[in-house]
Image: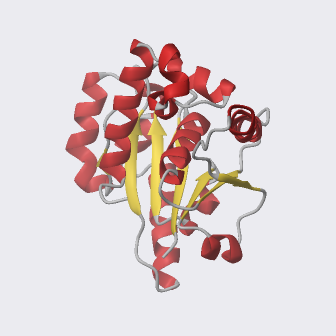
Amino acid sequence: MTRIILVSRIGQKKGQTLFAAHLATILAETKKTALIDFEQQDKVLQNFTKRRKQISADKKLQLPAAQLQKNFSKETAQTFDFVVLDAKDSSLFEHADILVVLVSDDGVGALLKKDSAFLSTVWEAKKKRAARGLNAFHFFVLPNGDFSAQNKEQLKKDAPIIGCQITPTLKDNSAYAKGLNDGVTVLDKNLPFFEKTFNQDDFFARRNLKQIVQFILPNK
């Protein structure tokens, strides 16, 4: 059965597309995975997937890669094991089986206010799913970057009321962004071809990423 994972964000800090790309790559290691870009910012995901294909061909490697799709449809959902949506548009929330929202310090108020517009949107999406006979999506909040301990503690305290789970923090690490630009993720660095370029930043980024994915999908 296909699982649809929607990656969104609250706040100005970047990281949404970066996390969607890395998440889809992890899933593609063992499952047929689609990646759909609703943001279309500077063709980041298009360039990322294109670069991965080039590396695989040039170096005769089999890098795990999600298939970038232009549109989201029932046919797409039925063809893949996982579909990862890179989308901030809250009107798409009702299509998600798993909703992952990156939250930076400047956006945390949208979750801590019980009557916030964002939480109302989440609730409406759940009601729409229920009306269609679907289960409510699993809602994960992913603290993003240099996230204050105070805000994280408050989020954990309010999580049962909000109806979400708080994942490990997606830490600031240049290895993430560099990998996105090069078409090489930190997950690829265990392959012999990349061993010489594997460094401390790659090590910590890979461990961080695996902790987050294990939290969201413990039995992927």
- Residue at 48%, 76% (x, y): give it: 1
Q: How many marks?
A: 0
Above or below: residue 70 compared with residue 8: below
Near-viewer residue (207 or 117) = 207
**Display coloring:** secondary structure
Q: Position of residue 148 (x, y in %)?
A: 32, 22
Q: Position of residue 36 (x, y in %)?
A: 68, 54
Q: Is residue 113 visible?
A: no
Q: Position of residue 34 (x, y in %)?
A: 63, 58
Near-viewer residue (104 or 171) = 171
Q: Is residue 99 visible?
A: yes
Left or right: residue 105 versus residue 84 is: left
Above or below: residue 218 compared with residue 166: below
Above or below: residue 193 compared with residue 27: above
Quadrant in the rendering for residue 171:
top left
Quadrant in the rendering for residue 98:
bottom left
- Residue at 68%, 25% (x, y): give it: 181
Quadrant in the rendering for residue 20:
top right
Rendered-image quadrant of the C terminus: bottom left
Q: Position of residue 8 (x, y in %)?
A: 55, 46
- Residue at 51%, 60% (x, y): give it: 31
Left or right: residue 80 versus residue 140 is: right
Above or below: residue 22 compared with residue 135: above
